[in-house]
Amino acid sequence: MIDGLSRRRLLAGAGVLASGVALGGVAGASRGADANDADAVDELPLRWNRTYSDATYNGATSVVEGDDGLVVLGQSGGQPTGIPGWLFGADATSGAGEWLETIANEEGQRRPTFQDHVPAVDGNGYALLGMAAQSGTVALVRTGADGAIQWWQTFESDAEDGSGALLARDVIRSDDGYVVAGAEVRSGSASGLVVRVGPEGDERSRTRLFADQQSELLSVVPDGDGYVGTAVVQVSSGGQASVRSVVFRADANDEIQWRETFTAPNDGTSLAQNQLVDIAPAGDGYVAAGFAASRSLDTFDGWVLSVDASGSQRATRRLSPQPATRFSAVANTADGTVVAGQGGESATAQTGVGVVGELGDGLEANWSRTVSVGATNNVRDVIGTADGGVALAGITQYQSQSADPRSEAWLVKLGGDDAPQVTATAPGTDTSSTATPSPTATATPSPTPTATPSPTPEPTDDATATATPTATVPETAGPDPTETTAGDGPGFGVGAALAALGGTALYERVRDED
């Protein structure tokens, strides 16, 4: 259990200048696949592009739509590591921040980096998933609808020698509890792991999947009495190791019903990384998204794959709306499948833009655009909203060491109900449209924001950012996705805690410019 460290107050929700511009399609969409582009589809209009901050370092990792708006999970604190989580609410039409609750365990305990959250099984609150990579523990936290903590459970490896570690990537609801997916590391070997947890946080079972290979589960979605998911496995061929993706289905007893292994389409160039990091239902099948990288790790392309209900491939493509692209999220929306992630000019660039696009039935690009605020912009999650729009959540970072905040939680809304555009400048510059936190705690969410955004015209091409993606080592728990420990193969260095995506980190290094 935890002590009474939670707090609640109004959240600052500053509007930011929209930096997206329609690209008119995704470059390289048919690379490695036959082109079957559909007729042009109207791009979803930008409704708002906002940042949120409560301290020097802030970031969002997951977003869901609740009864009263968007509910976002992330972190906030005075330093880039070991900071509390936060759960906050935002108006689904305007994006204005409405309430915030800090999610923190007892002082002195290792604080987890929160990864994901889902509505609670009883429909009244949320289940939050986090992991502390350095201690090898996983946390599952239950809150009420207002973010107040109801229980906190920590899970650790049961390896007899005490050297094991757990990693958490995704959580979903089951009929009477939760399914936590990730991996367990024992004696230098990793295998996919599923932990089933009851509605009150009691652990019910642990099941190791793909134990015959170095493996890790990355994403799962409910499917009847079981679930469909993606995993990465390490394979060796010709003396060289590479990472491939597996799409699989498991039943209510966590027994695998089918599994299919995939690599991204290529032009004969060896790909060391083939990682489908997120999966979503699509019609009578599924669409998964991630990235593919060359063995030299100087090339990154977004990768999408569709399968039918039995795992058989329907279509696969490498998409690069930016020269170097990595997808981190995929969602089924009112209009179809939307993917999102980060892109830029090269795999080693120090800055990056968010990318988002809609896919047709053959995974062709219907449209795509970039969005950004600061120097480095990471989209971590994407969902379809009830009003027919799309919401993105992530983190934007600023380069200057004198900037305060250095990073902010970031939400973007495309399509759906119209709302006035809002404009704000980067930290350190006065702006009348920036909302400020209320110094007085409130017991319940405020129905109105602390500031009313000023309408502004739709941004022009002049507002488009020129940022590019970063592949530098994150400063927090998650390691560099390109890091390799000798003998373990690309992406599976045990010293790197098996971060196949590197997405556990809330912040990434950027060059400082005072």
Image: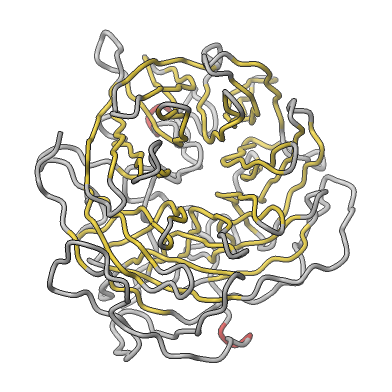
Q: Position of residue 93 (x, y in %)?
A: 48, 72
In terms of depth relative to the viewer, which is nearer, 205 or 416? Answer: 416
Q: Quadrant of the C terminus?
A: bottom left
Say above or below: 215 vs 337. Answer: above
User: Picture quarter containing residue 156?
Assistant: top left
Q: Nearer the viewer, residue 61 or 420?
A: 420
Q: What residue appears at the point 22 percent right and 74 percent down from the top-left corner? A: 437
Q: Residue at x 43, y 73 (%)?
A: 50
Q: Looking at the image, is 318 positioned above or below residue 462?
A: above
Image location (x, y in percent) of residue 65: 47, 56
Q: Quadrant of residue 23?
A: bottom right
- Residue at x 29%, y 68% (from the top left corner): 53
Q: Nearer the viewer, residue 92 or 30?
A: 92
Number of marks drawn: 0
Left or right for 333, reference 97:
right
Residue 48 picture location, percent across and down: 50, 76
User: Is 173 left or right of 258, judged from the image as shown?
Assistant: left
* Above or below, 196 relative to 442: above
The figure's colour scheme reads secondary structure
Q: Is residue 443 above or below residue 138?
A: below
Q: Point out the image quarter for the N terminus.
A: top left
> Quick one: 6 or 24, which is closer to the camera?
6
Q: Position of residue 394 (x, y in %)?
A: 44, 59
Residue drawn where x is 89% and y is 53% of the image: 35
> Residue pushed farthest top?
160
Q: Is residue 261 left or right of residue 463?
A: right
